[in-house]
Amino acid sequence: MKKKITVILKKNLVNLGSVGSIVKVSYGYAFNYLIPCNFADLATAGILKHYQMFSNIRQKKLNKIKGKFQILAQKLNKITKISIKKKVGNTNQIFGSVSDKEIISNILYLTGERLDKKNLYIPNIKKIGIYSLDIILTNEMRIRIKLQIFPAFI
């Protein structure tokens, strides 16, 4: 009987590896724990070929998306600051708050690209002044833009 068997992991496991890793484990560990708990699949020739095909497709999609994000990052780096007018009181505190829709519409006007609100990290803004706005495109790509809030006189 074989001592080791090859499996493809379906979930991240601390001791074995991440999703999609091809690992050799003992026969009993594979058939008594990993496969019944749906943590892994048996690595046959057909499944390995299938896995390789899907990993190539996934890599092509990731490269395409990364290219789009690099173009977007170049456009966003051209922006020095975003200015927003808000109503203020006597103590320079703004009425209401700065919404993500206002910032997204300003970025759309300046670059022509529409961002998702999940990409924005807006600090807590209570007074007029200059704040730092973080735009997170991917784990590696972060862009910091100045956000200026100044009073709108009626």
Image (spheres, rainbow, N blue to C red):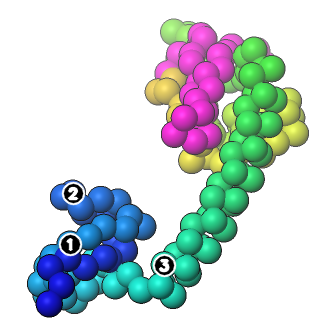
Above or below: residue 147 compared with residue 108: above
How far apart marks 1 and 3 lie (CA) works out to 16 Å
Above or below: residue 57 compared with residue 45: above
Indicate left or right for 142 with 41 as reference: right
Q: Earlier in the sequence, mark 2 or mark 1?
A: 2
At which x and y percent is residue 116? Answer: 66, 48
Q: Earlier in the sequence, mark 1 or mark 3?
A: 1
Q: In what quadrant of the picture does the N terminus appear?
A: bottom left
Q: Mark number for residue 25?
A: 1
The type of residue carrying mark 1 is Val
The type of residue carrying mark 2 is Val
Helix, strand or loop under label 3: helix
Q: In what quadrant of the picture does the C terminus appear?
A: top right
Q: Residues within 10 Å of mark 1 (few under 14, many from 20)?
A: some
Q: Earlier in the sequence, mark 2 or mark 3?
A: 2
Indicate left or right for 33 with 132 as reference: left
Indicate left or right for 18 with 112 as reference: left
Q: Mark number for residue 14?
A: 2
Q: Nearer the viewer, residue 56 or 48?
A: 48
Q: Which residues are magenta?
A: 126-154
For residue 32: magenta?
A: no
The type of residue carrying mark 3 is Leu
What is the chief secondary structure element of the magenta stretch? strand
Above or below: residue 140 compared with residue 64: above
At which x and y percent is residue 75? Answer: 81, 29
At which x and y percent is residue 87? Answer: 67, 22
**Residue designated by label 3:** 48
